[in-house]
Amino acid sequence: MNQSVSHKVGRNDPCVCGSGKKYKACCASSSIALTGHTTNVIDINSVHQQAQQAIAQADFTNAELLFRQLHTAKPTDAYFLASLGQALCWQNRRRDGVGYLLQAAKLLERQALKTRDPRLAQELSAQLLHWGEVNAAERLARLVVSLAPNAPAALNNLVLCLTRVSRNAEALPFAKKVAELLPNNPGCQVLLALIEDKTQQTASALTRLESVIERNLDPEQTARAYLEMGGVLDKLGRYDEAFIALTKASEGHSALLIQHPAQREYLFEVLEQNSIGFTPALLQRWSIEEVTADHLPAPAFLMGFLRSGTTLTEQVLGAHPQIIATDESSIVHELVKELEKLTGIKQNTALAVKALKLADIQGLRQFYWRRMQEEYGPEVMRKQLVDKNALNTMDLGVISVIFPEAKIIFALRDPRDICVSCFMQAFSATPATVNLLSWSGIARQYSAVMGYWLAIRAAIQPSYLQLRYEDTVADFEGTYRQVFEFLNLPWHAGVEQFHERAKGKYISTPSFAQVAQPVYNKAVARWRHYEPEFATVIQDLQPYIKEFGYES
């Protein structure tokens, strides 16, 4: 997804400020006095060029300052307002940044009708969708479609808005129109097939995916078509064919990887380094009483391996009126970066933690809670925070030392079901997920992550609760009563309707469609359909199958 508002304006195009004039007669050559500072005159075009250069250099702090000047000079300019919001989002100041993006959207809803220029509205719609503001993104997308009803990009953007919140039946006619306008675009055909599958048009979806594969116009989309075909065949009970398709998807995606082989070892090296470095002595260096003298709230962390049910639990917990549950929060990652900056020690968090003094620990705690308030508002200090991110498992040592009073909810699921689920997902190739593109890589990464959990859990100071996905399915109320008791909170019957709350809500993980419906058991023991395939990876998984009670 394009993550910049990079609207290019020609000299004869309508000016982005919404004046109705041509750009060359408006902002292109104007110098404007900043409001309230008549002696401080800025050259709009010059400052704009500097801001664009700052973005190109990833200097978002300077970009923010420059776009603030431009916004002050022209407060009704939707482009400058949106660019300021984006610069803030890039600095992890999402709450403030999205506020500016939403203001820009309101301006554009008025200005786009006057200028009849939908380009910026379409880009801003995509940005709002990226940051989870689905309703505003959809409004802009529909506005753009009304201005350009036969523009494939506009229609496709609306399709993405609707499918992102599982409104597939509404998206279907727009997706069909895109596919008709761009019959040779494999990406559009794959997206339409995915929607057809979601709307019970399985035969059509399968035929469409086979056509994409046969034509093989784009290796990346061919691999994606194999992946989606695997899911369709799985639903049809054609498991042998499904695994073949998934394997071809894995091979196709792996062939496109640009990472050096050494980069694929990054996660394993970090986990090994943490296992060695976070000794019991380091994990218990300061007592809970020493660290919590600042009287800050006690956070809870929800983690585990990917596809282990963390999104389901986050949605259930978030339905409790006394809980704020985050959706894939990155603030622990920011905390680690702050730790590195404070100590000057990079790529070795255990060594960095060892260099800290108690005052540094308390400073990092202040940093964490300041960022939480910036992202989730002041309520986060009054309610129970549940910071959810499966990848935080890698930073459990840091969490343990800085938040010894915390509570850890660690999600478990049958390792074999996790492998099947991961194999059916379209992961981007980041250092934390690149190994999940292959069957053997999934099993190896599961073994490394869960081996780290077993190695460290006995020495950490935070209390922990292991939560089995299968238990939440078999006994929803009984299992989650235990979770709320662990968090020292009363049972709240409203959490049983968590799926109603999730409908129409932006959820960043691949589980967004599943958690918008009641708990179901069809994902339990799914691995049995692929039992012969586990012969090659069972050695990596067997210790954890036994440890977590999945042998029977």
Image: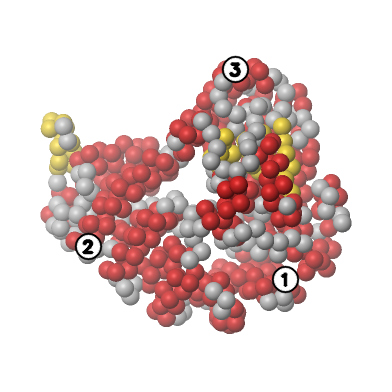
Q: CA distance from mark 1 to mark 3?
A: 54 Å
Q: Is residue 111 left or right of residue 443?
A: left
- Camera-side residue: 317 or 452? 317
User: Residue at horizontal 83%, vertical 68%?
Assistant: 532
Q: Which is more toward the observer, 476 or 140?
A: 476
Query: Please, what secondary structure does the residue beneath circle 1 have?
Result: helix
Relative placement, left or right, of 27 versus 468 is left
The residues tagged by marks 1 and 2 sit, at their Cα atoms, a distance apart of 50 Å
Point 48% across, 66% down: residue: 167
Q: Which mark is residue 63?
A: none
Which element type, helix, strand or loop, lies under badge 2?
helix
Residue beneath disc 3: 293
**Vertical order, 172 against 38 (above or below):** below
N-term mark: 1 or 3 = 1
The x and y percentages for residue 28 are 18, 51
Inspect the image, locate mark 2, and give the three-letter code of the amino acid beneath it: Leu
Residue located beneath label 2 in the image: 113
